[in-house]
Amino acid sequence: MTDDTVLTVEDLGVTLDGQAVLQNVSFALKQGEAFAVIGPNGAGKTVLFRALLGLLPHAGLVQWRKNVKIGYVPQRFSIDRSAPISALEFFLLQSPNFWRPSAAFTSQLNQELKLMGLDRRVLQKGLGELSGGETQRVLIASALLQQPSVLLLDEPTAAVDAGFEETVYALLHRVQTERGTALLLISHDLSVVYRYAQRVLCLNKSVVCQGPPVDALNPQALATLYGETSFYHHEHGPAAH
Amino acid sequence: MLTLMHNAPHTSFWIALLVGIASGSVGPFILLRRMALVGDALSHVALPGIALAIIYRLDPFYGVIVFLIGAAFLIYWLEGRSRVPPDAIVGLLFTASLAIGILMIPNEDVVESLFGAFPTLSLPLLLAILLAAAVLSALCFLLAKRFLFLIVSPDLAKVYGLGRRYDLALLLIFAMVVALGIKLVGTLLMGALTIIPASIAKNLAQSMRRYVILSAILGGTISVAGVWLAETFRFLPGPAIVLLGVGLFVLSLPFARRGMA
């Protein structure tokens, strides 16, 4: 592992319920880069993330740099809308003191809210009352509170209005350039990948292509990935997504 | 004054107050984890424990605590086995415990075991119950952040190092609170006492911190008021507490937030 490598993955494989949903996945993530993972539904993108985060058992090597701080932005909250939990309390889950947050924590929170373009009034809203765009920005701001050196984002614009998608990526780009945070993101949007990612990994149960988007995403690779999928179809059920 | 506490009615009032607060403190987390039904069924496991304690001439409390802690470990183990909440297994197993308990318990003790009574306790046991209730309430507040994190996003919580041991901690706290209140409220109704204050508070609170505090206050208030009603009108305390709570829940319904399932 070289000095600027944050994550090394070698021959990663995940088997769920007896079926191989990921095989022979190898790549490395470098400090400060934006690395996109693309692929059709059921390609194993979310499974890959869950394996990297230690949430799923896997074969092969997943090696994070020592003492690395990982921020994870899931797609959504796993809670019903009627739960009386305010956005402030969601942020307080990251605070050493849940009942009486320190001034230092509040000031850090204000900074992250500002970076994400969120008004402080959002803090008093219930989690169930947030719009798709607010939810995503709250999730990202919360992940940033720990000052992570890597941010894993699982389709950060899946629940966001079409017009707001670009804003989320522009904000993430700002985090990457201003703080040197490495971004590992699952995306469906190829234009976003071309525009913001330095490297891309095309995944369909195993690696189809890898490299800078302009090189890796050639017509043949894209056809293999999204079009002529029968060659890569292993008679597996869809992976958890 | 302390020497008077082991005689009813003071015993019942003290237990109602502190166990009520403990029930109200743990309830929000049980409710948000969607474990309300599992929790309700868990209290039934106490019955065979009571039966064995009676057979071996022990205080039923000891049988209750052993069986409930065992049941908490069992639920934890079952949840780890499958992604699907093992509701059916838990329901069957715990209903079977109820049936076994009823067959084993002498007839004269059945009603008291199911629906509670005004307990007469030795002073050391009473003090131990009150102290345990206070400690369990405090633990709910201290661990609130961790319990909530696992509820809001289990994956995120695990990424930040919060493992399933907090699920076990919640189950054990819950089992112990149920054990503490069973003499007063009974095995059939004690599960409900943990759920009712939390259900009322959920309709009224706008934030989690207020939710837990309000639920704890309601738990203590409803239990004490229920004991007072039971004593005044010569009811059993368990049904009085539960019916008072359900009445307040109905009154709180107009305040329920949108999106309620």
Image (spheres, rainbow, N blue to C red):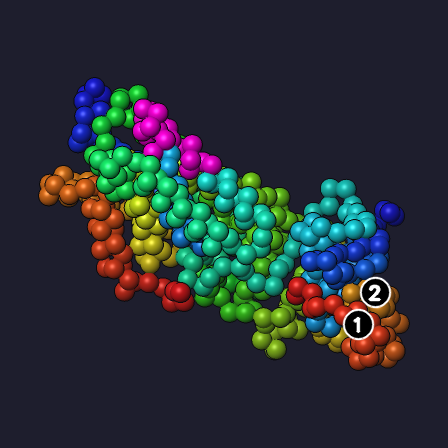
Subunit under mark 1 = A
Q: Residue furthest front?
A: B103
Residue for point 22% across, 24% down: B6
- At x 87%, y 47%, the residue is A1
**Disc 1 marks which amino acid?**
His
Q: What chain does mark 2 sit on?
A: A
Query: Which quadrant of the figure has residue A12?
Result: bottom right
The residue that appears at 20% across and 46% down in the rendered structure is: B240
Residue numbers of the magenta segment: B51-70
Residue bearing the label numbered 2: A207
Inspect the image, locate mark 2, and give the three-letter code of the amino acid beneath it.
Val
User: Could you tell me how far apart the alpha carbons at marks 2 and 1 are, in whole angstroms?
Assistant: 13 Å
Q: Is B178 placed above or below A207 here?
A: above
Label 1's element?
loop
Direction left: furthest residue: B233
Image position, residue A174 (x, y; %): 69, 62
Is the residue marked by circle 2 packed among few (<14), some (14-19), or many (20+) residues within 10 Å?
some
Secondary structure under tag 2 reads strand
